[in-house]
Amino acid sequence: MNKEKWSIVCDKIETAITLGHYPPGEKLPTEPELAAQFGVGRYSIRRAIAELAKAGKVSVEQGRGTFVESGPLLEYAIGARTRLRKNLLSQGVDLHGELLSAQIITAHPRIAQALNLDKDAQVIQSQRITFADGVPLAFGTSHHCAKRFVDFVARRDVLGSVTETYKSYGIDDYLRAETTMHARLARAEEAKTLKLHPQTAVMVVRAKDQLLDGTPISFSEVIWAASRVKFTMTNED
């Protein structure tokens, strides 16, 4: 059976990306331009772009256009001492994060249990987004005991990393106690935040960190753009 037009266009654009005709970060021609280039209708172009976006080859930004994804998968090692900045900065990417929201709330029973807190305990809930070379990589929510970590969010913004923030509370070392991961399709708001096609997969990573004596200090849930990162489980520090 002959391939449909959109599939042929999809293959040709993907080949052009692979060969470097469209470098990472470059904006693709507009729909009318691509339609004229390949001699097909705009439906075929839209379908081809949608398939490329779902495969993580391009990102579609409303009002700006379609861009080639910025580069190869970043590697993120999950082990006894999992550190975001150490993981990514060593790969030569320009890493920065932004605080989206922060508030003190009564801990949800699941959070209270994870942090070994009383059921009515207050926790600091903060949401941040992480960019690698200007491309959104992940965003998520972390929880810390509000009584123990007073001003955690403000200190985190000043000191620039979670590790340095913990040191300001006298915590020089901590361990990853537990990590769970599962994949699913991005929800509408997640796709918008990470600039993904709505049918693109994300990785949901839930993690609990603890002191060396086993005392839990944080619980987080982070949504990662699955097409932009590769996870490796390791026993090394």
Image (cartoon, helix red, strand yellow):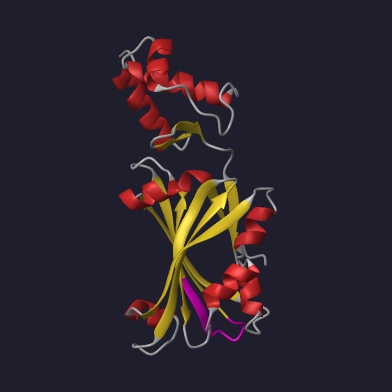
- Magenta span of residues: 211-219
The relative height of residue 216 versus residue 19 in the rendered view (above or below) is below
Give the camera-side residue of 75 and 154: 154
The relative height of residue 34 versus residue 133 in the rendered view (above or below) is above
Quadrant where the C terminus sits is bottom right
Residue 14: percent from the left, percent from the top? Answer: 49, 25
- Residue 218 is inside the magenta segment: yes
Residue 104: percent from the left, percent from the top? Answer: 41, 79
Q: In the shown orientation, is residue 9 left or right of residue 173?
A: left
| Residue 221 visible, this orientation | no
| Residue 116 visible, this orientation | yes
Residue 114: percent from the left, percent from the top? Answer: 42, 79
Residue ranking furthest to the top: 39
Q: In the shown orientation, is residue 60 left or right of residue 27?
A: left
The relative height of residue 123 versus residue 73 in the rendered view (above or below) is below
Residue lying at 56% horizontally and 24% vertically, measured from the top left: 22
Quadrant where the N terminus sits is top left
Residue 210: percent from the left, percent from the top? Answer: 55, 79
Give the camera-side residue of 26 and 79: 26
Residue lying at 34% horizontally and 42% vertically, measured from the top left: 198
Q: In the shown orientation, is residue 140 left or right of residue 185?
A: right
Residue lying at 60% horizontally and 45% vertically, measured from the top left: 133
